[in-house]
Every structure is written in structure tokens, then in C-alpha cells.
Amino acid sequence: MKIGELASATATNVETVRYYEKIGLLAPPARTSSNYRAYGADHLARLSFIRRARDLGFTLDAVRELLTLSDDTGQSCEAVDGIASIHLTEIDRKIGDLKALRSELSRVLGSCSHGTVADCKIIETLAPRGEAV
């Protein structure tokens, strides 16, 4: 299949496919006689794996590690568990940060008196301390 077909089959941008090839996550495909990239089932499976991992928020470095581990199916999955556990901890930290942000924004919105912008608590909160906008 051509790059556009691979991209479409995996809901991936063509430029992203090329980038994954460039950084070594996806093996370069064979070329046709007219110099088109010719992708096969292995490329589709690997790119689908990458997309799913990225959709779950794994970094490219983590995806690279997971791909390396997935290439050696006989080994223990302890390393995979470790990568996933580290990622879960990072997600939990981000959720905590988002909850704090939500709480602060909710507090600021709650202090709104719906007056003029000159008296707006949201604008006041966003402005550098002690400075007017």
C-alpha cells in the first residue's frame, strides 16, 4: 500500500508517517519501480501499535522502548509493566495538576461580580502581581 493508504488506515498524518520513519520507529519501506513507498502488513501493524500507544499518551521514547520489547516476545513483561507504571504515575500527577487548575479557575469565576472589565477578578488574577493590564 502507498503512504496515503497507510496513513488513512491508521488515522495518521502522512507527514507523521514520514517522521516516524525518519526517527526509526517505522522501518523504511521498499520502493516501487516508480519510487513510491510500498508498505506492507508489518508496517500497518507497527504503525497501529505506535498510534495506540501515542493515543494513550506514551512519549515517543516510551513507544520506542515498548516496540523494542514487543519485538522480543519471549522475555518477561516486567519491563513493559515498568514503563506503563511510570506513565500511569505521570498521568496521576497531571490529573492532580488539572484538578488544582480547575479549582483555582472555579474560585476565580465564583468571585466574578459581572461588572466591568476594570473590576474583573479574572483579568486581575491573570495580570502580573501588582500591575494593571
Image (cartoon, rainbow, N blue to C red):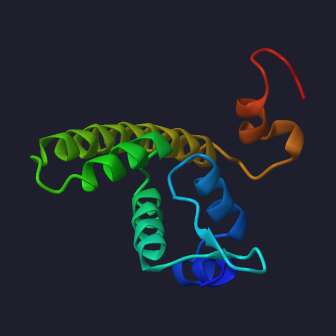
Give the position of the C terminus as an image quadrant.
Answer: top right
Q: Nearer the viewer, residue 38 or 95?
A: 38
**Quarter-of-image position of residue 83:** top left
Q: Nearer the viewer, residue 121 or 18?
A: 18
In the drawing, does residue 51 fall left or right of residue 125? left
Give the position of the N terminus as an image quadrant.
Answer: bottom right
Who's the residue at 49% across and 79% down the image?
Answer: 40
**Quarter-of-image position of residue 108:** top right
x, y percentage for residue 31?
66, 72
Who's the residue at 41% across and 73% down the image?
Answer: 42
Q: Nearer the viewer, residue 102 or 35?
A: 35
Who's the residue at 58% across and 79% down the image?
Answer: 6
Who's the residue at 58% across and 60% down the image?
Answer: 28
Image height of 40 relative to 131, above or below? below
x, y percentage for residue 43?
48, 71
Image height of 65 relative to 20, above or below? above
Image height of 87 relative to 11, above or below? above
x, y percentage for residue 12?
60, 71
Q: Residue furthest top?
A: 130
x, y percentage for residue 4?
68, 80
